[in-house]
Amino acid sequence: MEARKGAWWDANKIGLSSPPIETPGGWLVLYHGVRQTASGSLYRVGLALFDILKPDVCVLRGDSWIFGPEADYGRGGDVHDVVFPCGHTMSADGDTINIYYGAGDFCIALAQASLGSLLRWLEHNGKPCCVNSY
């Protein structure tokens, strides 16, 4: 994926995180995006879905971010307004995903989500990926 141009929430930088998650609909990727603002960079977490048989083909990409810095340790820290996913584990129920993320560039925190709800969110809030030709 490449960063989008303009005022998108991930316009300035795209970064990967943990390995893609295999789902029946494709490979789910949590990534961090960066947008420059007058007060500095904002790091947030987004979702993208890649084709299960052709993992180099992006199928859907969230039009907005799903997770941003809210707690003091993400809003402050060594670098302000930073969260980025570092890894994940799946709970025994097969639906609860434990997302380990960096916050403020000085600590690791844990967020939990339902894999099913993330996929439904992306289905309703995602747009087909575009490929720029050079």
Image (cartoon, rainbow, N blue to C red):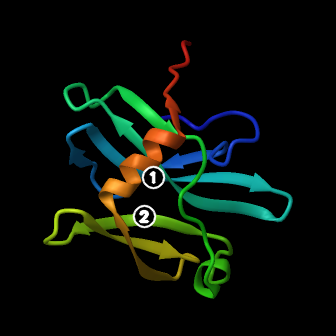
Q: Amino acid at mark 2?
A: Pro
Residue ID at (68%, 75%): 80
Name the residue type under label 1. Tyr
Q: Quadrant of the C terminus?
A: top right
Residue behind mark 2: 85
Residue lying furthest bottom in this view? 72
Residue 95 point in image, percent of width and height: 24, 63
Give the residue drawn at x 67%, y 83%. 76
Q: Does 52 appear above or below 95?
A: above
Give the answer, above or below, for where 110 lies relative to 114.
below
Residue 118 coordinates in the image, percent (x, y): 40, 54
Disc 1 element: strand
Residue at 61% over, 61% down: 43
**Residue 25 in view in this figure:** yes
- Seen as rendered, the residue at the extreme left is 92
Q: CB of mark 2 within 8 Å of CB of mark 1?
A: yes
According to the picture, the residue beneath numbered tag 1 turns out to be 31
Residue 100 is situated, as x and y percent measured from the top left of the image, at: 37, 73
Taking depth in this image into account, of 111 and 41 the one nearest to the observer is: 111
Q: Is residue 66 above or below residue 93?
A: above
Residue 42: where, in percent of width, then height? Answer: 68, 61
Question: Splitting the image into 4 quarters, where does residue 8 fall?
Answer: top right
In the picture, the disc for residue 59 is none
